[in-house]
Amino acid sequence: MIEPLFDKLAIVGIGLQGSSIARGARVKGLVRRIAIADTSPDHLERAEALALGDSLHAGADAAVEDADLVILCVPVGACEDVAKLIARDLKPGAIVTDVGSVKGSVVRQMRPHLPGHVHFIPGHPVAGTEYSGPDAGFAELFENRWCILTPDETADPTAIARLTGFWRGLGANVETMTADHHDLVLAITSHVPHLIAYNIVGTAADLEEVTQSEVMKFSAGGFRDFTRIAASDPTMWRDVFLHNKEAVIEVLGRFTEDLIALQRHIRWGEADELFDLFTRTRAIRRGIIGMGQETPAPDFGRRKGS
Ligand code: NAP
């Protein structure tokens, strides 16, 4: 056990992310006390049953009192309301951060409401699953994953170093970049892939010539993998697309052009073009495995028949 990095941690939103942070911080001894706030009485009840925190609060304002580290783990669209609610109760010198999947919008929503005496350092752990709620979290979620911090040029280097230490304590690797660059990178690596999954599963569900039971019965590996992604939380993903509009539309434009090119290769039987693309994409998959961000096990490590 190491000396705790913070005395009191306040987590606002005890879902997949919040409960994983609570579990990890507890297991690794990163903080002395954890206060939890959530608007859902059911989630607070589960947090109590799972012993995720030392105090539970219906209001985020009460949870952040005296906290040295405050982490918003709510859907991106809820950040402004939470910032307004907690602003007056934040302790001078506290670090305020978040885990939202979009960064530019979170900054625009929160910055105007936060007092000048706190350190605001937005963050995004690139780690998740398609499950949500307090039962979905686990202490190892962030291990060997990347956490991106997007401090602006006015941010205090000591506060950045303290927050970096916290994420490293949870097992994550930390990188910093601007909020705008984050939003463009995540549009291509996460947001548009989710949109494609939602779209293809929606198209399959709407196909009139193929029944829904046929779609489920004959779902081959490719389609099944899309359904896993398309099962992700509707509130979270609605907010991601509404709040990262520009970068998603930019990447979707490129995607659409490339899709049309593929359609042309198929129409005209351009075998070499198809083969070359599929060879290049295979190398990307191998690169991800090589960097320890995925398992090489066949079928994503699923057991046979599962
Ligand atoms: P989640 O499991 O649905 O948890 C969110 C929790 O926040 C829920 O308990 C929700 O209650 C509560 N909540 C909503 N509005 C609130 C408010 N105004 N005040 C207090 N609590 C509130 O979601 P999650 O997957 O942990 O995602 C949380 C954040 O992490 C999102 O911003 C998301 O973009 C980001 N993120 C998610 C992933 C992922 O894979 N899931 C990965 C990286 C980052 P209700 O359910 O009753 O609304």
Image (cartoon, helix red, strand yellow):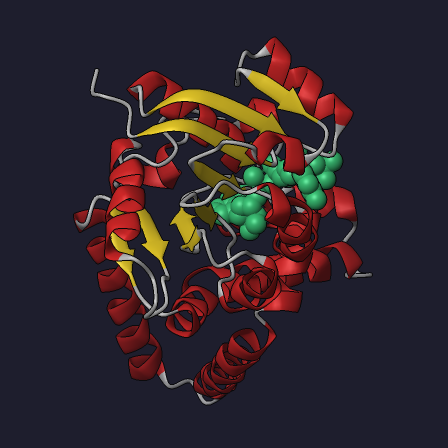
Q: Nearer the viewer, residue 167 or 64?
A: 64
In the depicted structure, whether residue 304 falls above or below residue 100:
above
Q: Position of residue 53 (x, y in %)?
A: 53, 18
On the question of residue 224 being in view, the answer is no
Identity of the residue drawn at 46% across and 90% down: 268
How far across and how far down the image is residue 133, in percent? 62, 30
Q: Residue furthest right?
A: 208
User: In terms of depth relative to the viewer, which is nearer, 269 or 240?
Assistant: 240
**Residue at screen point 56% across, 56% down:** 114
Q: Quadrant of residue 183?
A: bottom left
Q: Quadrant of the N terminus?
A: top left
42 to the left or right of 184: right
Ligand 1 falls in quadrant = top right
Picture coordinates of residue 296 (x, y %)?
Answer: 25, 41
User: How far across and how far down the image is residue 257, in percent?
Assistant: 50, 87
**Front residue (pair 150, 227):** 150
Q: Residue at x 24, y 56 (%)?
A: 157
Q: Is residue 273 above or below residue 172?
A: below
Instruction: Look at the image and tell me whether residue 35 can be seen.
Output: yes
Left or right, 74 with respect to 33, comes to right
Q: How many tags in the picture?
A: 0
* Left or right of 102, for residue 279: left
Question: From the viewer's perspective, is residue 72 above or below residue 55?
Answer: below
In the image, residue 261 above or below residue 53: below
Question: Residue at 66% across / 48% down in the picture?
Answer: 82
